[in-house]
Image (spheres, rainbow, N blue to C red):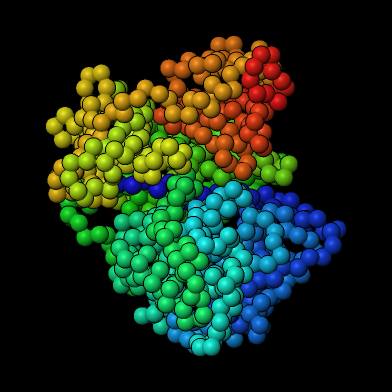
Amino acid sequence: MKIYKLRNWLVILSVFILASCLGDDDDNNNTPDQTAQTTEIKVSPALGLTKNANVRLILLATNTPIEGATGNTGETGVATITLASAITEPFIVEVLGGGDAEYFDEAKGVFLTLGADTTLRAVLSSFQSEVGVTTLTEIAATAILNTGATSAEAINLVNEQVRVALAPALTDITMPPQLIDAASGVTASSDQAGIYAVSLAALAQLGSSASSPALAIIDALRADFLDLTIDGKVGDQAFESPLYNASNFISEYTSAIQAYAQQVGLTDDLSATFSLDNIKKTLEGLSDIFASLDLGSLELDFVPGGLSSGSGGDSDDDDNDDNNGNDGEGNTLTITGSTTVAGVTTGIEEIKIRNVPAPDPNDLETIRKQIEDSLAELEVNDLAFELVSSSDTEIVVSVRYSVTTQGVTVTSDLTYTWTLTGKDDDDDDMDDDVMLPEVLKGKVFDMVFMLSESGSSYADGQKVRFTFSSSGMMFIDTDPEAGNGDEMSLDDVMMEGSEYVYKDDGFIYKVSVTETGLNEINLFTMENMFLGSFTADGGDEIANLELVTARAGEYRVVGEGHSRGTVVIGSDGSIDFDTGISFAQSDIVIIYDRTNLEEEKRIQVSYGADNNEPLINLFLSADGSTITSIQYRILKDEVDIMVTVEGTVTGGGGG
């Protein structure tokens, strides 16, 4: 089955505790730079035009409303909010239903009530004076908030991918659209605002069978995109009464755009105007962000028609997904404990997270990984954990760490308790004792798919990267060259004869090995029909090696924990970090290209199957031309040495 990491509840918790402990500093946290001149932000909710709706601004990191940052859209549909200063961190624009709030539904052609249970949001990475809150921003906001993302980089990436998927002709989904408030006689502008308005109206048309089409389509799409693909499902749960046919979504959507555009006076080359050929059903490059999303724990009652229990496949698959109940169904993670700030210890309110995969108490690395996943957005220091106890019904782990925010250090002393209620001792199909052989553990394999029969989700000749963890998980990167991480992670490995078998999404992967290594991976349908084989990529080249070799040289460095004062990068990609810490080219498992990031541009050279193993990060300048700092890290051993590059002795591209 697919594994979705825990939603990062502790990000909000820890920052909230820190903010509350700062006491008199709250005002400064909520509205930074109070001495600056006043500034305005104009908010335009658009389903179409939305009247008499309250609007407020909320800081994303702390989920704290900004004092005085409220307004109402009135009859014009635009709320003007006056601030003491521009906001200097990511924030949420929230539009609230209730009272006299109503919106013009472009599918029904009338104003409909915007109920008190309705909230529309946009998440912005930085301040802007005009904001549109729309179907698209709500889809993106749902993803951002449920994944616990707080960085400007993550926010921009999610917003951008929603734009690319559903409105590629736009430059920004947070811009205000044209506000439409009539069923006939409307002329849409041919600029970005008009294109945006037509796109929103077309989406509303897809929900025309609902009583409130525009709101219904928001609910459907924001749920559907949580697994990164419009497929009429949330994970393995299908919509019971879908508003649209997922397989025909693009054709239905583009047809609705063309029809509505002509209705409102846009007729010139609609395919080019709306970039119809570029509309997609997938959000790409977000797998790292969405990896923290536990779909099983989300409450999705808002989905029109509700959710069914799955895709209706072979019922035997349910047994294979249980893994003794530790896949999360029925399990509960309870977090208790205390935090200490400036010598003052405060107990935290108990947190319960339902439907959480429980770690294997015999695999400490799995426990560490799950804890690290739950803390993924925090800059954690001194993480330590200890298995307190384990039984068939409960696993208890002691967790300690500290985090520094705004110059203040918060130390947490917590207890994680997994209560196992999904136990299934009758699951005879699973072999709990299956262990991967040494030729697979911690190894990465670049493979090429050779198509035999139609019906596969892979193309003939497609390159795919398989990574096997020491605990038995198999990670699948369907586009290694994109550098956007793994699309799937599968556990529940079984043995069939001499093959190691994984099942997911209607397919079976059978891994065949020899005494010296991986032989091939064969792909089957759930009905055991052979589809094709993944075989070893013939090339011995290490992907992205040139990123390292191009920066070969001897670098003068300074930093705590480093003794020699130099780091040497060889012309073959070898890295000699310090006395007794060096890696040859043959030690490299994978090189990640992170030079396209807006912040912390880097080249990550990994010497193991995951981020717990040794790695070296080469951090680059803003333009990517020089190395500014170098990090040597082994998470599992709590090793983290960062050095600053002062210059070069020979070659290289140092600071």
Report the side of 261 relative to 51 (left or right): left
Q: Position of residue 454 (x, y in %)?
A: 19, 48
**Which residue lies at the image location 64% right of the left edge and 17% below the top edge?**
651
Q: Position of residue 507 (x, y in %)?
A: 23, 47
Report the side of 485 relative to 403 (left or right): left
**Which residue lies at the image location 42% right of the left edge and 52% below the top edge?**
294
**Which residue lies at the image location 86% right of the left edge and 58% below the top edge?**
35
Q: Position of residue 478 (x, y in %)?
A: 36, 41
Report the side of 31 relative to 618 (left or right): right
Q: Quadrant of residue 283?
A: bottom left
**Which residue lies at the image location 62% right of the left edge and 31% below the top edge?**
619
Nearest to the observer: residue 367 or residue 627: 627
Q: Quadrant of residue 431?
A: top left
Q: How many numbered dots are placed on residues in this image? A: 0
Question: In the rendered view, would you say 413 is above or below 580?
Answer: below
Q: Position of residue 254 (x, y in %)?
A: 40, 68
In the image, farthest residue toward the front: 268
Question: In the rendered view, would you say 419 is above or below 74?
Answer: above
Question: In the rendered view, would you say 48 is above or below 651?
Answer: below
* Quadrant location of the C terminus in the rendered image: top right
Asked whether the viewer can see residue 557, the reply is yes
Nearest to the observer: residue 46 or residue 269: 269
